[in-house]
């Protein structure tokens, strides 16, 4: 006889699905932008290569979201990666100080 899933178990799976979808999209977008600016090739080829790589990056984030021991750990890893990629993109894009007028 199989046990029915409990509400906390269902909520944990739902949280991982949301984290995998949203976090995967965000990480893929950040990494695509960063790779587009940093790959040493013509701009069109860099954008195409970065976009193709984003599919593998999205899958990797989905795997991380479901392989982590807990939802909190998965969120911490994906959030930390988003912060690192965001800061790297900010530095590479040549953004000025926060609040500076263009």
Image: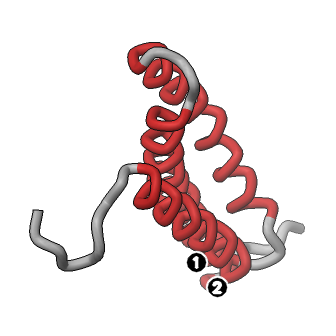
Q: Quadrant of residue 39?
A: top right
The image quadrant where one finds the C terminus is: bottom left
Residue designated by label 2? 8
- On the image, the x and y values in percent for residue 44 come to 40, 15
- Report helix, strand or loop for mark 2: helix
**Alpha-carbon span between mark 1 and mark 2:** 5 Å
Q: Is residue 45 above or below residue 31?
A: above
Q: Residue at x 65, y 78 (%)?
A: 76
In the picture provided, is 77 more to the left or to the right than 36?
right
Front-lying residue, 63 or 83: 83
Tell me the quarter of the image containing the N terminus.
Answer: bottom right
* Residue holding disc 1: 11
Residue 72 picture quarter: bottom right
- Residue shown at 61%/83% (left/top)? 7
Residue 8's x, y, as percent?
A: 64, 85
Outermost residue, left side: 101
């Amino acid at each position: 006889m199989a046990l029915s899933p409990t509400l906390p178990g269902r909520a944990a799976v739902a949280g991982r699905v949301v984290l995998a979808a949203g976090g995967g999209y965000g990480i893929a977008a950040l990494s695509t932008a960063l790779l587009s600016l940093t790959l040493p090739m013509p701009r069109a080829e860099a954008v195409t290569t970065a976009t193709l790589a984003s599919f593998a990056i999205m899958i990797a984030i989905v795997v991380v979201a479901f392989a982590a021991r807990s939802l909190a750990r998965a969120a911490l890893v994906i959030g930390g990666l988003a912060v690192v990629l965001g800061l790297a993109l900010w530095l590479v894009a040549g953004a000025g100080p926060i609040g500076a007028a263009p």
